[in-house]
Image: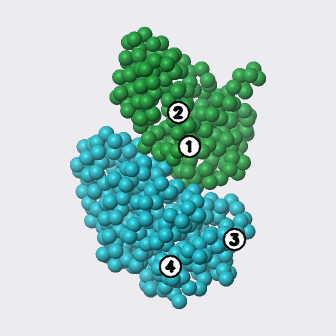
Amino acid sequence: MNNNLNRLIDCLIEGDQKAAVDETKSLLESGTPVEIVISHGVEQAMSQLDNKCTVEQFNLLEIMLSGRAVMGVMNVLYPPNQARVYTKGKVVLATLEGAVHDLGKNILRMILQTNGYEVIDCGKDCPVDKLVNTVKDEKPIAVGLSGLITTVIPKIVTVKSRLMEIGLDEVKVMAGGAALKQSTAERLNLDFLAQTAFDSLNYLSGFSRRLKDSN
Amino acid sequence: MTKTQRVKSAVSFNQAGKPVVIPQILAHSAVLSNVPIKEYLTSGKTLAKCQLNALKQYDHDGLFAFFDLGLEAEALGTKLFYPDRDYPNIKRYVIQDASDITLLTLPKINDAGRTPELLEAIKIMKAEVGSQVPIIGIFSGPMTILTQIMGMEKALFLAVDELDTFLTLLNFTTSFAVELARLMIHAGVSVPVLFDPSASPEIIPPQFFREFVQPKIREILLETKKAGCLFNWLNITGDITTIFPFVNIPEVDILNIDYSVDPEIAAEKIQQTCIDGNIKPLSFQEESEQFIFDKAKRLLKLFQRRKGFILSSGCEIPFDSKPENVKAMVKAASSWE
């Protein structure tokens, strides 16, 4: 792998946005295709961050800095007038009413977009009705929810049933966050309960692969 | 022996009699008293009534004075929305951009937002229980106030991009925390709890905590001691194992450990400070009485020789905790031989 790509990976892991953007520009100027910057640079960095999240106590600040650097790079690779084609499927994200912060959701959005998923973000303080209507309109492969405090649990529990009531059984519902991690997927009526944002990506990757194979 | 004396004995590692048990009963006391959450969070009289009722029903070892994490931010100008049955949500942060920072001034705290209601709750509880029962007053730490006045994302990026501005703000929120804690102590709080979930190692790196946040925490806790509190209680939340060296300090008398902390490691690493914890809060809602009872017994056994332990939940128990589960926890302590 060329040295610039290695430097890009280091900058992304260190969360140095300016240096990461400079490395990306230099890679593009030297003729490296965008796809290679993504697959051998950005995705490699994300994979290393995933490992770091699992084996070390990785904190939000470090993830946010890496996330900001990744988004800076993505903006260079796909400027606003050159929209990226998302190939891995659509995911609807929301932080439901009462969940306090939407930081977890924003990190997941960045991870999913970087990895080729189209994200429809319902924002924070999202009522369950609005989420269900969005899923109905957008027909995603999955819904991602975040919850930092336990009071959001009664709302989380209703999402899967509400989707099933309108025939959207196949849409996977996944969630994560400090409050939810105390419980289980079964008790929260979820298809998947993530411990880290990368868990959700890995779950979706496996699920998307199975979906592709069965088609 | 009064409940206050029992807590004193636990903190001083001279525990005699039954173990001290303080589940973190906050707005659950409103549900227990059939009072709307919104009323509990906005009325000092109601909070005091519900806390006293919870004490009567559970016979645990402390009363809590706390509305929610929005109290300080609201007093500083952040706009909140109060759902009927939930904690308030932030509708608009008082700091929207950098220019707002220069306009921030310390308000007259005893008149700001819901502070007068909180102080009234403390005075009512104090009048009722005197010095028999510790009144535990929770106030937000400097990182949490900071994230509640400008948003977590902005606050954390500010710390990296404009450290001087961030530190100016941290000084400001520290001053606010000191003033609020003093008022609470003067109103009757004997055990102030510095609650700073935004300073958790799950949010900021341990080195960042050591360099910037821990000195502020020490500063606040020195002031609460000067104001005459019995004990300082520190609750950071999350897995705090990596910051043990920075919270195992003389200013902290009781250190909270969340459910994600291994209590055996805490018992081994924190030798001179009373520890409280650490039953998983959600299990008070989801699990059985037997589960809570067994979990409590295991903790009591683990700390039996060490002493310096308060049986507690790792954090606030949910609104809809099963009363029989709270009773099972108290029973585990009262039946301890």
Residue at image location 64% in from the left, 73% down from the top? B301
How far apart are labels 4 and 3 at the CA level? 23 Å
4 and 1 marks on the same chain: no
How far apart are labels 3 and 2 at the CA level? 42 Å
Q: Mark 4 is on which residue type?
A: Phe
Inspect this view and state whether residue B72 appears: no
Q: Which mark is residue A55?
A: 1
Quarter-of-image position of residue A29? top left
Q: Are marks 4 and 1 in contact (CB under 8 Å)?
A: no
* Image vertical order of residue B131 relative to residue B255, above or below: below
How far apart are labels 2 and 4 at the CA level? 45 Å
Chain of the residue under label 1? A
The residue labelled by disc 4 is B13
Q: Which mark is residue A101?
A: none
The residue labelled by disc 3 is B293
2 and 1 marks on the same chain: yes
Assess disc 2: are there few (<14), some (14-19) or many (≥20) residues with their C-alpha within 10 Å of its C-alpha.
Answer: some
Question: How far across and down, in percent of the image, does residue B252 sit?
Answer: 41, 69
Chain of the residue under label 2? A
Circle 3 or circle 2, nearest the eye: 2
Q: Mark 3 is on which residue type?
A: Phe
Residue at image location 70% in from the left, 51% down from the top? A187
The residue labelled by disc 2 is A48
